Amino acid sequence: MNCVALPILIPLVLMIMQIFFRRKIFSQWLGISGSLLLLLSTFYLFGQVTKHGILTLNVGGWPAPYGITLVIDYLSILMLVISAVIIFCISIYAVSFLKTTGEKQRFYIAFYALILGLNGAFITGDVFNLYVWFEVMLISSFVLITLGSSREQLSGGIKYLSLNLIGSLLFLAGIGLLFGKTGTLNMAQLAEILREDDSAILLNTSAMLFFVAFGIKAAIFPLFFWLPASYHTPNITITSLFAGLLTKVGVYTMIRFFTLFFVQDQPFWHNLLLTLAGLTMFIGGSAAIAQYEIRKILSYHIISQIGYMVMGLGIFTPLGLAGGIFFTLHNMIAKTNTFLVSGMVFKLKGNYHLKNIGGLVKESPLLAVLFIIPAFALAGVPPLSGFFAKFILIKAGFEDGHYFVTAVAVFTGLLTLYSMIKIWNEAFLKKSPEDPSHEKDKIKLSLLEVLPSILLGLISLGMGIFASSVFGYTMEAANQLINPSIYIETVLYNQ
Amino acid sequence: MEVLIAILVGFLYAAGVYMILRRSIVKFIIGIILLSNATNLLVFLSAGLTAGSPAFLSDQVSSQQEFSDPLPQALVLTAVVIGLGIVVFTIALKYKFFEVTGADDLDQLKPTDNQK
Amino acid sequence: MNSVILQIAARYVRWMLLIFALVALIRGHNYPGGGFIGGLLAGLALIYDGFAFDHKRISKKRKINPVGYIGVGLLLIFISLLFGILSGDVLMKGIWISLNLPLLGQLKLGTPFIFDIGVFFVVIGITILFFLSLKRR
């Protein structure tokens, strides 16, 4: 049996079950076990991809350019596996960090709707279908970001919603123009038609619409303002979920579109991508320095690190793309983990502001270790995953002669390190500003609370230690992207 | 006919952008509705307009000219449904926001940005 | 709102809208209509009371739970996807049977119709949910 649709079907079933069975205990355990099932199914699909190459499924039995095709290649399956890991960790984390029962129930329903859209966007091979999955994801993320309905959340929600709505309208307009030009929406057929087409001017219009739409989703330089304005408002569980997954879908689609069919006028696009990548890295990193709220520092770092991923795409050599994909995978894990840790800091100290907290290294040495791993992974300290990701990107940049962007990338690494050390000094090393005389009864973190963070930390470490095999997979993905003839062959002719 | 609708799309985009730039949230939502209608019309227009001909080839209809492409119509239908869902959610969010803050002005959202 | 005309009309208009919604749903596959339009009409029928009397009448007296409607709809959609797999083909493959009924003539039924009914319920649920979330204090 063809299992390509499993990553969509599992969240759909789980969402339906969450709607029907709303008892407290049940919805929690259903949430966790369902995510585990999703994780196992992505592992299975990973094995299938390494064995058989690209997997396809023609939904409804309609042959490829006419119906919707689901395609899983190396890039898709890597994103699927890493996001399933994050989903599993978040579903455990939500049990102890969401406050009320009603909140949890609504969270799990919208959570699975979000995953439905996310996985759909990763495996679809049809441009319009991608738009539909984006909207599924968008609507459920609106529900999640305004879950508590506090004043702050509603304000943040309106900002998030308005820019993302404009983004999806531009996306749809781009689809319209693309369809008008080519008469097809299947990505493989688009690639086949557009790779032999040299009328770049007409295509650049729709390519630019797509670029701006994905740029808004991915929060690259001039379009990122919605992210720091809204990401710190919802519950920390939801922030970590968004931080790990949402912006990366924008990066994924950008990589997909600009390697598969928008390959005309390459010098213009690659210069644009590299310039914006450099600006995104630098501005995100330097804006983070001015912040003193943990979640805001981390939010600005999301933006800064999106720059690295786009840089990998802009270099456009197999090594550069592999570096970009490696960085994306590493960043999803490490970024989620830092947010999870900041949630635990809040639980212990009741505050996110660096000036009001301190002394955590004595109070909870375990938490200090848990913070150090993702923070140093983000900053790029060996032997953690971030070091290798940045190393590959910088090597690719030098090899291809993009010295300026590469220099910016190195410098931004220092900015990241600075911010992480700032959090470390202020929150962990510094003496607690609280008056020690009125000793509160100390809150201990339970195993269930720290477990997701431990898991993600181990994966960050593992991605560093086994970097060569992870790099092998990303290199495989990059080669598939640079030479899409296999993709086109498999989707269109090899039923 | 295509030219007329293209001009209409242009007008709708212009009006939508104008409304989006206003400070009131209600006007912003109206702008979103206008923009989404403009985009739907654009998608609809993308395959050209062929009035009164069926969406399939048969013995009577054999040339490409007389054949109307059903795909953009299906796309527009989907986009309309999605647009409905999003506008509904936006209005509900706006209503809740108004209940909590009593404000219909985007300038009053400022606090979340520069909070220390 | 407290209008006598609306309140009396509510009794009849509700049923008319429901029947119209069902007609739109059933003729939907080959003619204008279908799950979405039928669902909007049926949703309108169900919230008619809310316009004429009070929104509490919808949730309390008629015991309508909008999220339940969405759940039923999604379940139907999911079931319609499975028929393709169960018949040994791919996901979402449409399967059609045609019945010869004595008075109505030939009637074609297929899994896309189940999908349509699912959409119908989801749209009803969303319409009611929207109405209640605007009315509720």
Image (tube, coloured by chain):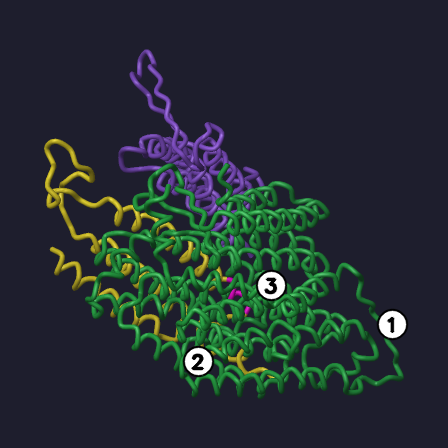
Chain colours: A green, B yellow, C purple
The local secondary structure at tag 1 comes to loop
Mark 3 burial class by Cα count in 10 Å: few <14, some 14-19, many 20+: many
Across and down, in percent, residue A400 comes to: 41, 80
Q: Which mark is residue A238?
A: 3
Mark 1 burial class by Cα count in 10 Å: few <14, some 14-19, many 20+: few
Which residue is at 77% across, 85% downward?
A429
Q: Observer-nearest residue: A70 or A93? A: A70
Q: Nearer the viewer, mark 3 or mark 1?
A: 3
Residue A30 included in the magenta stretch of the image: no
Q: Are marks 3 and 1 in contact (CB under 8 Å)?
A: no
- Location of residue A347 with respect to A65 vertically, above or below: below
The local secondary structure at tag 2 comes to helix
Location of mark 1 (residue) = A441
- Location of residue A464 with respect to B114 vertically, above or below: above
The local secondary structure at tag 3 comes to helix
Q: Which residues are magenta?
A: B96-100
Of helix, strand and loop, which mostly describes the magenta segment? helix
Return the chain for callout 1.
Answer: A
Quarter of the figure with the C terminus of chain A: top left
Q: Which mark is residue A189?
A: none
Q: CA distance from mark 2 to mark 3?
A: 40 Å
If you read the primary sequence from the N terminus, does the residue marked by circle 1 or circle 2 appear first? 2
Residue type beneath disc 2: Glu
Q: Nearer the viewer, mark 1 or mark 2?
A: 2
Residue type beneath disc 3: Ile
Across and down, in percent, residue C134 comes to: 49, 55
Residue C47 quadrant? top left
Location of mark 2 (residue) = A399
If you read the primary sequence from the N terminus, does the residue marked by circle 3 or circle 1 appear first? 3
Residue type beneath disc 1: Asp
Q: CA distance from mark 1 to mark 2?
A: 57 Å
- Is A454 placed left or right of C94 in the picture? right
